[in-house]
Amino acid sequence: MTNIDATNTDVQTAQPQPTSVHARIGAALTGAAIPADLLDLDARDPLAHKREEFTLPGGVVYLDGNSLGALPRAVPERLQRVAAQEWGDALIRSWGAGAAEGRDWMNLPDRVAAKIAPLIGALPHEVAVTDSTGVNTFKVLAAALKLAPAGRRVILTDAENFPTDLYIAQGLLDLLGGGYELRRVNPDALGEHLTADVAALLLTEVDYRTGRRLDMAAVTAQARAAGVLTVWDLAHSAGAFPVDLRGAGADFAVGCGYKFLNGGPGAPSFLFVSERHLGAMNAAPVAISGWMGHADPFEMDRAFTPAPGARRFVPGTPMVLSLSALDSALDVFEGVDLHALRAKSLSLTDTFIRLMEPLCARFPLTLVTPQEHVRRGSQVSYRHPQAREVMADLIGGGVIGDYRTPDILRFGFTPLYHSHADVARAVAGVQAALEARA
Ligand SMILES: Cc1ncc(COP(=O)(O)O)c(C=O)c1O
Ligand SMILES: Nc1ccccc1C(=O)C[C@H](N)C(=O)O
């Protein structure tokens, strides 16, 4: 139920009189008094049992599932089976063996896509799982530009978007040459920028630094009314709260497999293409068309015929090991009510913000995450002039969050494995870190 209970006593016994900053933080975590109202919230938490489905180290509160999700307990066994049996024993036969029972490697990307689809409000054939998020961003942006009328050659994006989104978009436009432009604007003032030369709008729903969430439905409607195709980066959304791409009328999306989907380091990314575009896209191959996205790869046809759905975006041989880990990790979401997930995420971040308030009064901490629920993802961030050093202290002491340039302390909350008691412990750790530094 909590991250650190059973195994953190060594910190206390070894350091009865904390002497270093790390030990002081560790002792604060272990000794934190958990307020009764938080214990009560945890006792009534409908997702509390999910914590048992993860392996987390003792002595830490892990607040970085928005960078690398924790390890689901079932994954190592699955990887062992894939390596020893499917690879070691069955060898090449595994590509096709067990197709009827859904165990063949060839269709593994599609089975994983079908598990991600309900988390993002998509149909299974609208989702593909392959490559990195950046590469998928390239492919869907290229598809969007191909669908847009010839006069529309601008990709509009958030000036402060995650760097890879900016780099990838610029790289694609450089390749296309004359007349194409990446226009970086403030996403809170989009209206004036949705002009007749804009082909696509590339936005990240939840900002990686501030945790600010955009109104996907409203922005998508605004873009559609202006004839602009939308490409949503769901890196910090998928698996953190329900996403409704179809409900919003989104055109394309991408997202990471290793953050809130817990697929492990380097897990394949997903992409979404609305089924209303699949027909129009049949006429031309996607930008990176490989044989695994062909309608019939082993026909070895010299001409490319796209697979019927989003599978056409899987260019090459499926990454079986990492796909298997992600496939197993996604089983954690079975039976999870995504609205309960969102409610718990908000309760955790609300609690964190409330418990941090006295520290904001005492130390140079400034909350940068919106307080308004509809504008918040599943993380809380503060500015601090020594954010880099403070986070290094925190990580050393067992509160694992992130430092982000230039001055951001970032704390990610994963409602599947965090409790409100974890929140109280984390704040006790932050308090110890700031007091030690002061
Ligand atoms: C918003 C966002 N987009 C894209 C990425 C990068 O994804 P990848 O490294 O899989 O290309 C990240 C994090 O790494 C991210 O936070
Ligand atoms: N893929 C990584 C590899 C190494 C270290 C961090 C990452 C992240 O994902 C960072 C994340 N995008 C972030 O918003 O901070």
Image (cartoon, rainbow, N blue to C red):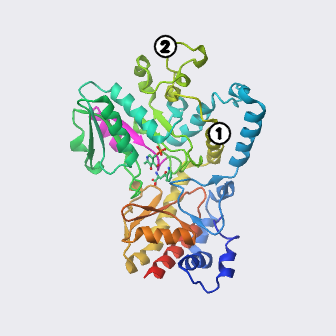
Could you tell which of marks 2 and 1 lies nearer the N-terminus? 2
Q: Amino acid at mark 2?
A: Ala
> Where 233 falls versus 65 (above or below)?
above
Give the residue pinned by disc 2: 303
Whether the residues at callouts 2 and 1 have beta carbons within 8 Å, the answer is no
Q: Quadrant of the N terminus?
A: bottom right
Q: Residues within 10 Å of mark 2 (few under 14, many from 20)?
A: few
Q: Nearer the viewer, residue 230 or 153?
A: 153
Q: Secondary structure at mark 1?
A: helix
Q: Amino acid at mark 1?
A: Leu
User: Can residue 245 be seen by looking at this rendering?
Assistant: no
Would residue 425 appear left or right of 13 to someone viewing this image? left
Q: Residues within 10 Å of mark 1 (few under 14, many from 20)?
A: some
> Where 193 falls versus 287 (above or below)?
below
Would residue 426 appear left or right of 359 to someone viewing this image? right
> Where 340 falls versus 398 (above or below)?
above
Give the residue pinned by disc 1: 321
Name which residue lies at 50% across and 50% down. 241
Would residue 252 appear left or right of 113 to someone viewing this image? left
Coordinates of residue 36 in the picture (x, y in percent): 59, 75
Q: Is mark 2 within 8 Å of ligand 1?
A: no
Q: Which mark is residue 43?
A: none
Q: Tell how many labels.
A: 2
> Where 418 falls versus 320 (above or below)?
below
Q: In which quadrant of the rendered view does residue 276 lie?
A: top left
Residue 220 drawn in magenta = yes
Name which residue lies at 42% across and 26% down. 287
Q: Which residues are magenta?
A: 216-237
